[in-house]
Image (cartoon, rainbow, N blue to C red):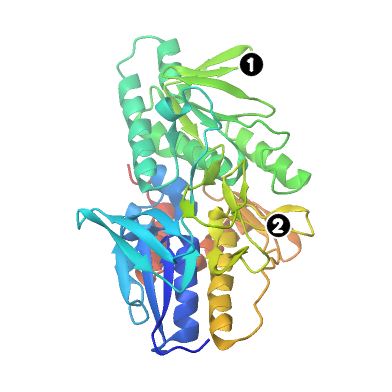
Amino acid sequence: MTTSAPIRVLILGGGFGGLAAYLGIHRRLHGDARVTVTLVSDRDVFEFTPMLHEVATGGLLPSSIQLPLRGIPQCCLERFVEGTVQRVDLDRRVATIDVPAAGSSIELPYDFLISALGSTTNFFNTPGAAEHALTLKDLAGARALKTRVLTQFERAVHLSTNEERERALRFVIVGGGPTGGELAGELADLIRHELARAYPSIAAHARVVLLQSGERLVPQVDAWFDRRARAMLRQTAVVDVRLRTRVREIRSDGVQLDGEFIHAATVVWTAGVTARPIELQASHPIERDERMNRLKVDASLRLPKYPNAFIVGDQAWVYDREERQPYPMRAQFAIHEGTVAAENIVRTIAGKPLEVFRWRDQGFLLSLGQGGALGIAFGLRWSGFIAWWLYRTAYLAKIIGIRAKLRTALEWTLNLFSPRDL
């Protein structure tokens, strides 16, 4: 493609997919005056969300998993806009952005679009879930959960019966998988150590109930991994893991199951996500996955009929032909998809064939509390301290920003010799 005017690349979303896309263009086109990049995000910080469970349980401070988006390399970024995407006109190649600081909306034209708006919590139409359950999608949710845990312990001190204390200190997590399992493990550690020392008279009444609707707690991996994960959580004597358990309703005082009601003052929803909605104006039909609202793209991550529009991350429905199912909505996939989309824009500009998105399994790591983890990496199964060290090393490498890496490493080191931050 050759043109005298700059080629305008518009990236929507400052999460894993959007940031990976920008850094990919930065690496490949640094110093190329033909291309301008605009990044739009509804917040001015990037959050390393896989570590939210550690913020919620005092293992990390919020600043350790944050990176100001204005702190990323600005050399290839013509403009950063803090605003919310209202709609995208695919035919006109224009995105309309609501900018609160300006008190109005603006239109951003583009030649290439990368949409990486991520996902939002999916309550699957469960009655009462949106009203009464806490979530763990961002730092605000992590702070709210930490505050709730500490408040419930403080409240339980003043209760008169053991039944009241048990209800106040029962924490129900709805949804297994990596998020639910890791939160349960960290919360059990917090209860058994820091909170047991701070509240010695009532900590024994605290329990974590982990509810999973499926046959496996961690459905992404094999049966060995799943059995070990459940065994390690149960060994804490704090976590009660229940499989094949469906939640019918969430109320302010607990969770209704089939034939049973669990009294609990705190319910955390980690059961799933759905792609963040985006209004697309288009003369050609746009296919979506009805269950998760993801946009169906081709093997090069482009919208059919709109070859200049790339969709990545949790918004993208990309079919895995080997597994015969769409790729999961996880951070590592969003990062790779963002990188591939950036590469394909570079190739389109250069008139070269596009890259097809392919995934090479990088293993699976799950942290289940201080010093305990499971992993499948390098073709081997790992458990215990070695898996926990691998987990910490892998995630430290993935954290973006030198300051955030150093803060995280320092806090993890301090946690080996001192209590968590309460």
On the rendered structure, is 249 left or right of 135?
Answer: right
Question: In the image shown, does 355 or 272 lie closer to the viewer?
Answer: 355
Question: In the image shown, does 34 or 137 lie closer to the viewer?
Answer: 34
**Residue type at numbered disc 2:** Tyr
On the rendered structure, is 131 left or right of 368?
Answer: left
Q: Residue drawn 41% across and 25% down?
A: 132
Q: Do we see residue 66 in this rendering?
A: no
In x, y percent, where is residue 168? 40, 20
User: Which quadrant would residue 290 be assigned to in this image?
Assistant: top right
Question: In the image shown, does 177 or 105 lie closer to the viewer?
Answer: 105
Q: Secondary structure at mark 2?
A: strand
Instruction: Give the distance between the C-alpha atoms of the residues marked 2 and 1, in whole angstroms.
Output: 35 Å
Q: Which badge, 2 or 1, comes first in the chain's sequence?
A: 1
Q: Do we see residue 105 in this rendering?
A: yes
On the rendered structure, is 135 left or right of 215?
Answer: left
- Residue position for label 2: 319
Work out whether 381 lies above or below 54: below
Residue 402 circle label: none
In x, y percent, where is residue 29? 46, 85
- Residue position for label 1: 258
In x, y percent, where is residue 394? 56, 64
Dot in front, 2 or 1: 2
Question: In the image shown, does 76 or 278 lie closer to the viewer?
Answer: 278
User: Which quadrant would residue 149 be assigned to in this image?
Assistant: top left
Quadrant that contains the C terminus: top left
Q: Residue drawn 35% across and 37% down?
A: 144
On the rendered structure, is 29 left or right of 84?
Answer: right
Local packing at callout 1 (Cα closer than 10 Å; few below 14, some 14-19, many 20+) is few
Q: Secondary structure at mark 1?
A: loop
**Residue type at numbered disc 1:** Asp
